Image (cartoon, coloured by chain):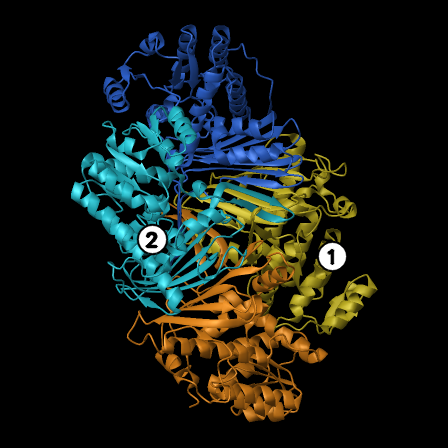
Chain colours: A yellow, B blue, C cyan, D orange
Amino acid sequence: MGSLHAANLASMPPVELVHVSDEREEVARSLAATLGAACSTDPGEVVSDPRVDAIVIATPTSTHSALISAAASGGKHVFCEKPLGCTPREHRDAIAAANDAGVCLQVGFHRRFDPDWVAARERIAAGELGEVYLFHTTLREREPPSREYIESAGSFFADFTIHDLDIARWLVGEVSEISAFTAGLSDPLFRESDHPDQAIIVVRFACGALGTIDNSRTARYGYECSTEVVGSHATVRIGRNQQRHDVQWLSEAGVRVDHIREFAERYYIAYYSELEGFARAVLASEPVAVSGEDAFEAFRLATDAQRSLELRRPVTHAGIEMEAESVSRAGRCDSA
Amino acid sequence: MGSLHAANLASMPPVELVHVSDEREEVARSLAATLGAACSTDPGEVVSDPRVDAIVIATPTSTHSALISAAASGGKHVFCEKPLGCTPREHRDAIAAANDAGVCLQVGFHRRFDPDWVAARERIAAGELGEVYLFHTTLREREPPSREYIESAGSFFADFTIHDLDIARWLVGEVSEISAFTAGLSDPLFRESDHPDQAIIVVRFACGALGTIDNSRTARYGYECSTEVVGSHATVRIGRNQQRHDVQWLSEAGVRVDHIREFAERYYIAYYSELEGFARAVLASEPVAVSGEDAFEAFRLATDAQRSLELRRPVTHAGIEMEAESVSRAGRCDSA
Amino acid sequence: MGSLHAANLASMPPVELVHVSDEREEVARSLAATLGAACSTDPGEVVSDPRVDAIVIATPTSTHSALISAAASGGKHVFCEKPLGCTPREHRDAIAAANDAGVCLQVGFHRRFDPDWVAARERIAAGELGEVYLFHTTLREREPPSREYIESAGSFFADFTIHDLDIARWLVGEVSEISAFTAGLSDPLFRESDHPDQAIIVVRFACGALGTIDNSRTARYGYECSTEVVGSHATVRIGRNQQRHDVQWLSEAGVRVDHIREFAERYYIAYYSELEGFARAVLASEPVAVSGEDAFEAFRLATDAQRSLELRRPVTHAGIEMEAESVSRAGRCDSA
Amino acid sequence: MGSLHAANLASMPPVELVHVSDEREEVARSLAATLGAACSTDPGEVVSDPRVDAIVIATPTSTHSALISAAASGGKHVFCEKPLGCTPREHRDAIAAANDAGVCLQVGFHRRFDPDWVAARERIAAGELGEVYLFHTTLREREPPSREYIESAGSFFADFTIHDLDIARWLVGEVSEISAFTAGLSDPLFRESDHPDQAIIVVRFACGALGTIDNSRTARYGYECSTEVVGSHATVRIGRNQQRHDVQWLSEAGVRVDHIREFAERYYIAYYSELEGFARAVLASEPVAVSGEDAFEAFRLATDAQRSLELRRPVTHAGIEMEAESVSRAGRCDSA
């Protein structure tokens, strides 16, 4: 993800990529050489580089909060991958650091920059949908990530479902109740409770609408991300044709089309646009499109989902005492 | 529904339609005249008509069980719309009456006869899907039925969701746990608890798979019935193109296609085929494709869903004591 | 085709099937037994059967004209498969016989009864399209018919393209110029001139619009029949999703759907409806939907196409002297 | 088109945009300022700029040949929009100048770089299609260009159809015969002969396959570019879903999706990729993907199409004497 962001920044006219940092020296050096930037293995050098105005963070989640605070202290604007941390406190600290320093803090909910979701949201906002009745969103990967990744990534909901929780809030509004259901089916690595490979989350919105999120780590056919919102006037469906190419192949076996297999195929525009939006906000001193508070809200919902799973009943949002460090096992990730 | 079944029977080569009964004399007379059959306002006359071998029942739910018992006592085979009754006992009585009399009893789960679902089930059975991980099914009406209908139809789940509960069992297998969520949003007539207009049901199958059912009485765009099953090898989607015609209309406003608006457009083949299947089973003295036990199982799941709604937590199947007449408000319908 | 029509007639409420005739005694007897009708091997017996009001003819083309004349002389209404004969004179004779006897004569251009084409035509007629600019239609078979069929069926255009020529007239209007191009590619049986396996026909309509017809006998992927009309306001596309089932199958190989493989899958509604329309016209003494003159016009266009092929240049319609028996090789079929 | 190319070059890592030239000083200055380049109104200054290695030409067709020769003389590699000139001689001169100078000359047939067409071609080349039987391609604009453009752009075929003629050669092979049909329907500005708004071109390939090209300047619904190749084993369809977004909007009026309206929406990847391919070829001293000879062949076919139109009969390719300056009116454009 860091390489992708770096390459996008290098080809973005208003931006000059000046410094690349990775703790693996080989990676940092190679990327910097390709893109014509300086390199280091210590992120502190990026913060102290006087040519740097803004920093993009794509490191493991457990390092996010401290890196954001360091960058903010150095007066650098920050774009950070989700989530901002492994606990509510880490989120709060990161947000406070950015606020205190008066720097921009944008979170990598890239789907908010995808042309399909943007088009849908605009038309929903224009009233074409009427009142929302039902919301459905699907996020599925073709193959699960490595055991190492899964064991270090914190709760499934905070790592994976969090994108869907954000899109639910962004398209429909605040969530008032959440119920989670999971299963571990494809491999002994996956367990129902901690590291599921399938999940269904039911949300009830403050406006009264109901919704589902379904997630799978094992959708062999490809990568899918699609959303439906059913309203009193109309219904919108986003991402139903998750095709890589607009090519149909017809034979005696039927009609076949290629499906999107990896997330990078689906979102190459969104990944570029989110950084472009960040650069524009920084240059114009305007608010960013996805704030630290947005990241916090999605993280709170992910925590609620984990609680619902453990309690085996619906959990009402706003019930979380944010001072408490880890309300549940889900609160811990590899930072612990 | 009765008129539709009668017309289908009248054009079905191995069947002769001989008697039409409706308590509204006008309706019975007009239909009988059009289709060349005798008519009556008393269903007892159908049972005592010696030319009748089999009876199709499409009356209000509260009359089903008694009519089935009467028909069975008269030695007539029975095709009955779902559900077989308003309570577990009504179901049990109807099934026992048919068994005791040695007549066929088939239930109107028409979707089992739709070519799309049949094709999918055959290929699932052939192993193309592998293990099932996720199941999703959607059933939505364009406009809600009348207040009278809603208030007399019993629980939403037993009246509406029951088709989806049956298809879940038929495609994936037995359900072990059910959780229900509802909302009443479009009109004061609808309430969250009793008569919702939107519902989400989460099921956990005995095989471990998870599933959702989503229902709406107010999908303005049309009638939709579609299903997805995600497996370890492949995924199948049924009914995604719910189109009336294969016609696209392109203009400056975009590409537009007509959607199916009413259930009769979607299922005219299935409604014919289910009766044809019934006639074939009767003529060949073979088991029917959808038994009274299937109807009972789906009704039990609908009852579980209602309990989950009232208890606000997941309900494990098999927990219902079938002797108890009405485990909850949902058990009652207009027969009470 | 005869069996299909007979089965449809047998299940059509206002119609009673009373007599089946086929020169192959086995076929006639078996069909008649299944459908509950009398049978004969001599079509003359059908004409003289006093219970018969109307006759459906699905014999080889070379017999059409004489059978129509015989039926008309006997006072029977006639539904006949296209074309009405192998020469202009045979067409003229058949039409005159029906007119003289005052009986209905309907031709089997079934696509005029398909719900998709009907819906498109209605909306074109309602002005949604504006002026027509371009017309395209495609008719393709999966596998070529037998050598015997091809060698006895007359010109490719009169046997195969004639459906497209009719639909061009029906949707857009009269054709003023025609240019034909053919190829014989898949097998030595097929030759560019006489019995092609691929063909492209360019038409210019009297209204100024241009159009193409493309035909193939070897579209391995299935049977396709689709049409597009481009207008000044909008464009309509008919039959683009030639799917048998509304089922998608997703796997690592992509998304796959079943295609229609045989014409009977595509047109089972149209084949029923055309006979139903014929029965309604006969019973109500109203004009039929597809007249003998329509058959004649389409046949003339097929003859023009063959001339264009032989002359290797566009041919202007209305240039045919209809009295001349066979303007070209194309005029002859197995009746010669 | 020049601005689009300039913006793409400015964001292409291996390329540095150093000089922008436009005879309209305002345009040159503004574009240069935005993209950080020098500017001039005289293209000769680009040629003499020592920092320039390669030049992208997007001027009116009549200037192409002379600019290519000048650039080649100055030792600059050249990317030029199609066609290379208004006459066969201009093409020959441009090609010879590049050959003599030993510089790369690539032509802007961008569709060869679109991922959809590339994917199809690769699979055709891999034999998935078998032998080609039929080829169809469609190119349509939503609104016609200005009168000024049309009157100065030379023959319709050399200006518009030329892309389709190139894609026919690229996907299927050499064309041996061509027949053209045109109409002028939407406005008095358009005439059948010189400046049509609708055209159908029938091609016969050297391999025996038949094909059609259909073009419209007035497809109100949007911009369409799609291709179908029917083969002995399979059929491929490219560009059938010409959608801007993957968003469906369902309401009582049916299902609606947005269509691509302008060519830039459809081909933004291809426009970038063709320059990237050019840059790669220049840097690696490798042959370009679309040569001057490719441009010449497509132009010859466009000239044949114009002759077919004038002669009202098919024209066999290779019949053009390339030395003759203007075989027909079509040979002249605003350079005359």
A71 lies left or right of D270: right
Q: Residues within 10 Å of mark 1 (few under 14, many from 20)?
A: some
Q: Is residue A280 above or below residue D251?
A: below
Q: Marks 1 and 2: in contact by CB < 8 Å?
A: no
Q: Quadrant of the C terminus of chain B?
A: top left
**Closer to the eye: label 2 or 1:** 2
- In the image, B283 versus C253, the foreground residue is B283
* x 44%, y 87%: residue: D326
The amino acid type of the residue labelled 2 equals: Ile
Q: Is any part of residue D187 visible from this angle?
A: yes
The amino acid type of the residue labelled 1 equals: Thr
* Label 1 sits on residue: A59
In this rendering, do the residues under marks 2 and 1 share a single chain? Answer: no
Q: Residues within 10 Å of mark 2 (few under 14, many from 20)?
A: some
C114 lies left or right of A68: left
* Label 2 sits on residue: C167
Q: Report x, y in % for residue A287.
A: 56, 62
Name the chain under label 2: C
Image-quadrant location for residue B316: top right
| Residue placed furthest toward the front | C336
Q: Which mark is residue A224?
A: none
Image-quadrant location for residue D115: bottom right
Q: Report x, y in % for residue D259.
A: 44, 59
Name the chain under label 1: A
| Residue placed furthest toward the right | A25
- In the image, C198 versus B219, the foreground residue is C198
Q: Is residue D217 above or below residue C243?
A: below
Q: Is any part of residue A72 visible from this angle?
A: no
Image-quadrant location for residue C248: top right
Instruction: Find the distance from the CA under tag 2 to the CA under tag 1.
Output: 63 Å
